[in-house]
Image: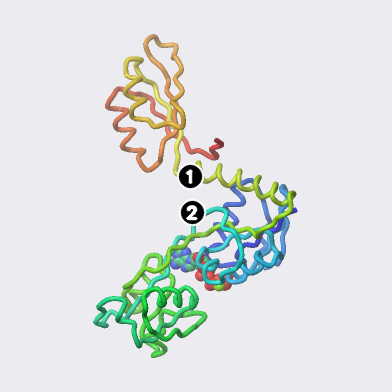
Amino acid sequence: MIRLAIQSKGRLNEDSLQLLHDAGISVDDAKRKFLGKAADFPLEVLYLRDDDIPGVVADGASDIGIVGLNEVEETGAAVKVIRKLGFGNCRISLAVPKTADYTGPEWFNGKSIATSYPNILRRYLADNKIDATIREIKGSVEIAPAAGIADAIFDIVSSGGTLISNGLSEVEKVFWSEAVLIARPGLTAEKEALLKSILFRIDAVEESRGKKYILMNLPNDRIEDAIALLPAMRSPTIMPLAAEGWSSLHSVIDGGSLWQTVEALKGIGAEGILVLNLDKVID
Ligand code: ATP
Ligand code: MG
């Protein structure tokens, strides 16, 4: 049995459960429950506030966890970051009222900065030799300047919409974060083996993300041109069709370049092009 801590509610909860689901691990989504058990994998799920996850994993009350890298950095907990998971992307930035005559990081000298990330901020200020006062507040950081609590803020930004609606402008991007899988050092051999099996599944899910399976019919004399257009995992699969002089070609491509590739393939005479979603890619 291995125990995984995830956020009980909030921004990372859904994506964490989705990742488990895609990895073929079904847990009952009882958000109010403190501890759940997977039906089809020897895994327990511990539902926690995100701030508590790194510490609980470091202490060994949970073996592994899914949490924002920002929380790992802020808590300084003794955990290993095993995988970046590609969701919960955000940054922590300094923002000042848009009316401020901001000149550069030295602007913060003698100013007060409200934040829920005092440790990451303290490190940034020290690295940049800035002497500012840190005011730690747990929530609603973005209203601090308007409320007269601080001159500026250091807070999580993704689209920047919250800053704009609070009359703030982002001036220094300091820390980039995304959800990560963490583990405590010194897992038993049994737990290591379970972690390895979870990673194998996560990697297959990640690998398939954004990829498409494409198949088409092609005159034989255009196969070389098609191969040049299709960077496949190895090389495309080519099978002869019953119709003389034609083949069927199968490959995996990046979804991002899908339309460009399809147009180019049509241009060299491909017909009957099918594009399918990929569920898992196992290397
Ligand atoms: P909890 O109640 O668990 O303490 P919280 O309110 O502290 O939750 P959330 O707002 O749910 O935290 O954010 C959880 C994590 O999601 C953050 O630590 C960060 O890694 C990421 N995150 C936060 N805000 C954003 C955002 N705007 N866009 C993308 N990811 C974000
Ligand atoms: Mg929190």
> Which residue does the numbered mark 1 point to in the structure image?
209
> Which residue does the numbered mark 2 point to in the structure image?
86
- Category of crowding for the residue at label 2, using alpha-carbon neighbours closer than 10 angstroms: few (below 14), some (14–19), many (at least 20): few
Q: Position of residue 166 (x, y in %)?
A: 35, 79
Ligand 1 within 8 Å of disc 1? The answer is: no
Above or below, comparing residue 196 to residue 155 in the picture: above
Q: Position of residue 116 (x, y in %)?
A: 49, 78
Left or right: 34, with 269 as reference point: right
Above or below, comparing residue 143 to residue 77 in the picture: below
Mark 1 vs mark 2: give the one in front: 2
Above or below, comparing residue 59 to residue 109 in the picture: above
Contact (Cβ within 8 Å) of mark 1 with mark 2: yes
Residue at position x 55%, y 45% from top?
Answer: 203
Say which amino acid is labelled 1: Arg
- Residue that sits furthest to the top in the current view: 244
Query: On the image, which quarter does residue 65 sit in?
Result: bottom right
Q: Nearer the viewer, residue 176 or 201?
A: 176
Say which amino acid is labelled 2: Gly
Pointer 1 or 2: first along the chain = 2
Residue at position x 36%, y 20% from top?
Answer: 218
Ligand 1 within 8 Å of disc 2? The answer is: no
Q: How is the image coloured?
A: rainbow
Left or right: 23, with 41 as reference point: left
Q: Position of residue 176 (x, y in %)?
A: 43, 63
Tell me the quadrant of the picture where the C terminus can be found.
top right
